[in-house]
Amino acid sequence: MPLDFDTHAHEYQRNGAAHLYNSTATGGVAVLWLDPGYGKTMIVLHAFKALYEACIVKNMMIVAPLRVAQTVWGQEIDEWASLNGLVACRLHGTKKEKQLARRDVNIWIVNYEGIPWAIKMAKQGKMQPCDVVVYDEIRRMKNAQGKRFKAARPLTSMAKFKWGLTGTPASNGLLDLFGQFLILDDGLALGKYITKYRSQYFEQGYDGFSWLPRPGAQEMIEDRIKPYIYRADGYLDLPEFVDDIRKIVLPPAAMKKYREMKQNLITEMESDQITAANAAVLVGKLKQMSNGRVYDENRKIITLHAEKQEALKDLIDELGDEQLLIAYEFNHDLTQLREVLGDDLPYLGAGINEKTAQDYVDRWNSGDIRVMAAHPASAGHGLNLQKGNAHHILWWGPTIDLDHYIQFNRRLLRQGNKSSHVVVHTFVTAQTVDETVIIARTEKDGIQSGLLSALTAEFGDAIITPEETKTNEDNSMTNLAFKSDANQQPSANPFAPQGGEAPAPSANPFAQAQPAAPASNPFAQASGQAPAPSNPFAPQGNGQQAAAIQDAVAAPPIPQPDPQSAPPNPFAQQAQASAPAAQVEEAQVVEAEPAPAAPEAAGEVNTATQHPAPSAEYVMVVPFSMSIPIDKMDKVLAAIGRALK
């Protein structure tokens, strides 16, 4: 039975929809940082429908990873009765250009690889610009120098509303945030140039390639982007997470072969140091060896051991009829799985088309598939695999990518899974890189530093020392402490039910003929009492919610300078603050006397120079003034300083 927003939406989902709906206060820019399972998709769709019915917007474009674009967004519209009237069309495949002729569509869905084609169609006049652009898993826009990012900028610039969605915004460090916000606000919060962003908030590491956050950088970045962000923590009754590390002990012959091949990797290096340029290759080789097979230089597979295959057989017997979702990384990992489970093993990864993938997802959720494999890059974002209450995940080998680890586990550990717990099994080969990868993933500040940390444990002195790559960015960098829903309250929430001691049955906002104004509440439930004067839309009884979000949502992302709180300007002209800037006057001789204190400047910035008197009775003073943009002040002051010298 289709769901209804009024009766089934959580409070944090109402507030999240309001955050998007009211994003005009921040130039149409808003970001949902919600963990997988919190319903980002339905929040976006209901916010768009409210804007659509208020005649503020006409259409929306969703940019999403391929698997998510193929399955999730269309399914979500079908599951909610309150989304009746929204028509989505996915632009993919050979017939996508013909779909543009449809006039009943108000939501277009493309995958990230389809962005250049969408821009081409818009330039040819075959596709109308969209009022709302949404980037699902906006972390894919972290590289502001990439072709994907550059292709997407015209798409965003034509939109009134620009929204971003992700559950792991900075899992690999604060540098990832730059591109995510540049694509939305064109540099308003964090600047337009990555070089300036790095120089302002980071210091270059001793190794010459890593960037370490300066002291206080996290707080400064948080302050810049907090008006855009909405988070909700602790609202879901999710299954308990159970971590099950299963150690795989290699026989002596296999361990000897592993160590020999590991040593050969060092001797094959052109230099005696391992750097970021080859760290990923080396860790990949070592992980393959730990999993049992490895590619040689000719892409031929070398078999080291089959211990993980034996462990898989034991786990399958142990689970009985329980479903098991297996995460694999390399193609020969999938081959090993098929050798144990059969060539017809369902999997989500390279080579699987949309129709087959959807069939696997449906059969998995219905319980018809007992064991399914998936690559984290293909199934790690957006897919709903929890509907059959499956609660066992196996990692064939630990991944160093924290984002992949979190997102893939959240395919089952999410809202709607009625199991009491979700068990994440991980095959870890003892005394190999598997052990160090887990430690590096937990303690790293980024994939790059994590790779180097893992290699340090494996190769010791052959690698750059940990002190040379150590960063000030601790684990808190992967869990940025921005405002959570428990400590915030959106301004003018059109989605919040009105409180009261005896509320009347909720009115149906979707049956009203007149469109709602932006500040009105198209989803508000009627109250039995008059609303409170302070905030008629705020949920009742939540004393912890503060007015922080109201200030944050309403405030521009760039803090404006406060002349009253600014330090005294040593170059300020001695004049009344309200007087206009004086023109350059002729030099005159005045009696030397102590200079009076300069009043605090207001409005435009005035500068003045005064030549100090040596010991003479008279001194020549040449007052002058000019209007200087505040962002040019540092350069002007530097020039004046050089001139005085």
Image (cartoon, rainbow, N blue to C red):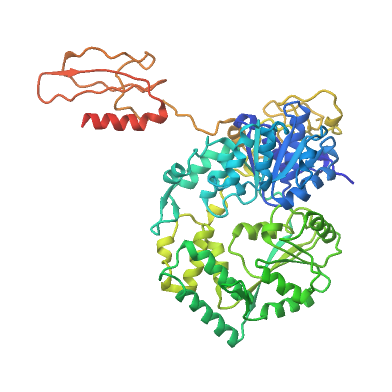
Nearest to the observer: residue 58 or residue 268: 268
Q: State whether residue 540 appears in this view.
A: no
Q: Position of residue 140 (x, y in %)?
A: 61, 49
Q: Quadrant of residue 28?
A: top right
Nearest to the observer: residue 636 or residue 596: 636
Q: Residue at x 17, y 18 (%)?
A: 620
Q: State whether residue 193 appears in this view.
A: yes
Q: Position of residue 509 (x, y in %)?
A: 83, 30
Q: How many marks?
A: 0
Question: Please, which residue is most extreme toward the left here?
Answer: 616
Q: Position of residue 139 (x, y in %)?
A: 61, 49
Q: Position of residue 558 (x, y in %)?
A: 51, 33
Relative to 604, does residue 51 appear above or below in the rendering? below
Q: Quadrant of residue 133?
A: top right
Q: Quadrant of the C terminus?
A: top left
Nearest to the observer: residue 485 or residue 584: 584
